Amino acid sequence: MKETTVTRFPSARLDEFATAFERDGMVVLRGHFPKATLLAWRDAFAPLLQQRIASNATAVRGENRHYITLPFTGLFADQSIFCDPDILGIVERVAGDDPVMCQLATDTPLKGSAYQDVHRDTPALFDGEAETPSFQLAVNFPLCDVTPDNGPFETTLGTHRMRAEDALAAWRDGRLPLHAITMELGDVMIRDVRALHRGTPNRTDVPRPMVVIGYSRSWYFRPEVRIDVPMAVHERLTPRAKRLLRYMPRVSELESTAVPEQYQKFAY
Ligand SMILES: O=C(O)CCC(=O)C(=O)O
C-alpha cells in the first residue's frame, strides 16, 4: 500500500494544535477525513453492529450503548486513516515519537441509552501524580453527523492533568462545565483519555457509531485492548503502519465468530 506523508497542515499549525491539546486535553480537526470513506465504513459497520448485539458479544457501556472492536481487514484496515500524517503529527507532539497503535473499535449509543457517569478512561500513570505528559490518546471520528439529539460526547476541558478528585469536585460544584462536542462526518477529535467526560443519550432511532483508535506512548502497554493483524493484511502495510502495530499479534486468519470483548473496565 502507498504511504501518504504529506500533511494537510503546515508544521507550525500542528504545533498550535499540540499547544491547544496541552491546554484543553483535546482538539478537533474539522472536515479532516473524506466523507465517502466514512460512509463506506458506516455501511460495513451496520451489519457488524447487529451481529454483535445479537450474539451478546459487545462490551456494554451502559444501557443500549455498545463497545465493539473492528476487524482489522478490508476497508477497516485503512492506513490512510490510521497513519494519517496530521493526526500522527499531533499524537507525536503530545505523546512522543514512535507511538504504538493498540485499539481500533467503536462506541455506539442507541435509542434508549442514558447519560454515563462522568469518568476518565484510565487512572493517572503514577498514584497522586496527575501532572504527567500524555501517555494514552483516543482518536475519535463518527460514522454520522453528531447532533445534540444523537448522543454527543461531553467533555470537560483541561482536566487531563488534574488529580481525579480535584477534577470531579470542580465539575460537581460547577467550576468546570461539560461541553457537548457536536461533529460532522469527517471531523476528528484527538483527546487525552484522562479528561473527565461522559456519553449522553441517543434520542434518535439511528445508531451513532464513533470510531476510536488508541495510540499510546512508545513504551505503554494496554492489556485490555488489541488488534489482531492478519498476515495477509500485514504484508501489504507500509513500514510506518507496521511500526505502529509492532506489538499487536499477527494471526493467520481472523476468528470467524465474535470473540468476547476483553475491555470491560472503562471508567475511573
Ligand atoms: O460514546 C461516547 O460518546 C462516550 C463513550 C465513553 O466515554 C465510554 O464508554 O467510555
Image (spheres, rainbow, N blue to C red):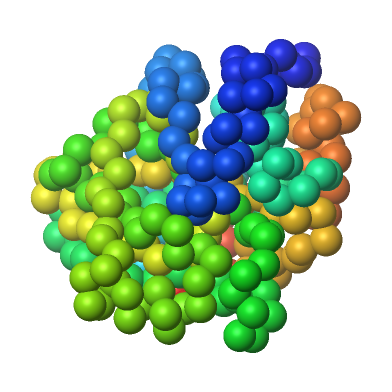
**Residue 238: where, in percent of width, then height?**
83, 26
Nearest the camera: 250 or 84?
84
Task: Specify whether residue 66 is in view.
Answer: no
**Residue positioned 58% across, 42% down in the render:** 19
**Residue positioned 59% across, 74% down in the render:** 130
Task: Specify whether residue 145 is in view.
Answer: yes
**Residue positioned 76% across, 63% down in the render:** 220
| Quadrant of the frame with the N terminus | top right
The image shows a total of numbered marks equal to 0
Nearest the camera: 51 or 71?
71
Q: Classify residue 132 as left or right of residue 220.
A: left
Nearest the camera: 29 or 199?
29
- 196 up-or-down from 192: above or below: below
**Residue 192: where, in percent of width, then height?**
54, 55
**Residue 224: where, in percent of width, then height?**
63, 69
**Residue positioned 78% across, 34% down in the render:** 241
- 158 up-or-down from 256: above or below: below
Q: Classify residue 45 as left or right of residue 5.
A: left
- 4 up-or-down from 106: above or below: above
Q: Classify residue 74 as left or right of residue 191.
A: right
Q: Classify residue 122 as left or right of residue 178.
A: right
**Residue 169: where, in percent of width, then height?**
33, 81
> Quadrant location of residue 36?
top left
